[in-house]
Image (cartoon, rainbow, N blue to C red):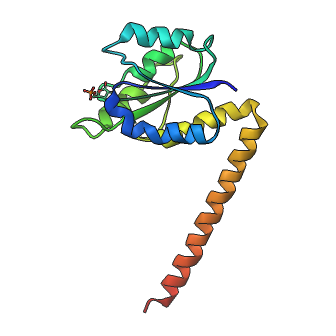
Amino acid sequence: MKKVGIVMGSDSDFPVVKGAVSFLKQWGVPTEVRVLSAHRTPAEACEFAAKARENGFGVLIAAAGKAAHLAGVLAGHTTLPVIGVPVKSSTLDGLDALLSTVQMPKGIPVATVAIDGADNAAILAVQMLALSDAGLADRLEEMRREMTAAVLEKDKKIRSAAEELC
Ligand code: RP5
């Protein structure tokens, strides 16, 4: 199976990212985690992205805050899909990172998830790998079924709780 690369701009982003790392590990997806910055280690970040395909990666997840150029810079150096996670690490509550990550110019896409949305980044990465992995695809279907059942159970409980109200 192809690897997922999770790159963060700083070790201070790790609390946002670690749930995604756990999710991928639980699903048996080979994962590599790096701290590489578009601004502080630009050469290393570019080299990582440029060699990612030959190094066995299938998807990259890039998490960064503030003027978050990491996802875009990685995307500019690889044709692998790049998922951007804007991190809420600033006085602007992550809106700066969201706009910096999502507003990519035509030709270099970044699939941007919600601010601090690393969990969805991990699920989306699995969905990409599942295009060529039937086992992952089956497991994703099962996860959806469980989610649906859990919400319908909540619906049932809330409806009966609401009926008991005066
Ligand atoms: C960004 O600046 C990082 O991704 C992080 O979210 C933010 C703050 O970094 P530190 O100053 O905590 O290293 O580049």
Q: Quick one: quadrant of the C terminus?
A: bottom left
| Residue displayed at 40% across by 21% down | 70
Residue reaching furthest bottom? 166
Q: Quick one: quadrant of the N terminus?
A: top right
| Residue displayed at 60% across by 64% down | 150
Position of 140 relative to 89 (above/below): below
| Residue displayed at 65% across by 32% down | 128
Asked whether the viewer can see residue 29, the reply is yes
Residue 17, by quadrant, is: top left
Direction from residue 145 to residue 77 in the image, left or right: left
Residue reaching furthest right? 134
Query: Can you give x and y, in whole percent of width and height, for residue 132 in the image?
Result: 75, 30
Residue 156, by quadrant, is: bottom right
Name the foreground residue: 60 vs 164: 60
Direction from residue 45 to residue 67 in the image, left or right: left
Query: Can you give x and y, in whole percent of width and height, for residue 61 in the image?
Result: 50, 28
Query: Can you give x and y, in whole percent of width and height, for residue 30 in the image?
Result: 61, 29
Asked whether the viewer can see residue 123, the reply is no
| Residue displayed at 62% across by 58% down | 147
Position of 140 relative to 165 (above/below): above
Query: Can you give x and y, in whole percent of width and height, for residue 22 in the image?
Result: 52, 40
Name the foreground residue: 4 vs 32: 32
Count of numbered labels shown in the rendering:
0
Q: Quadrant of ligand 1?
A: top left
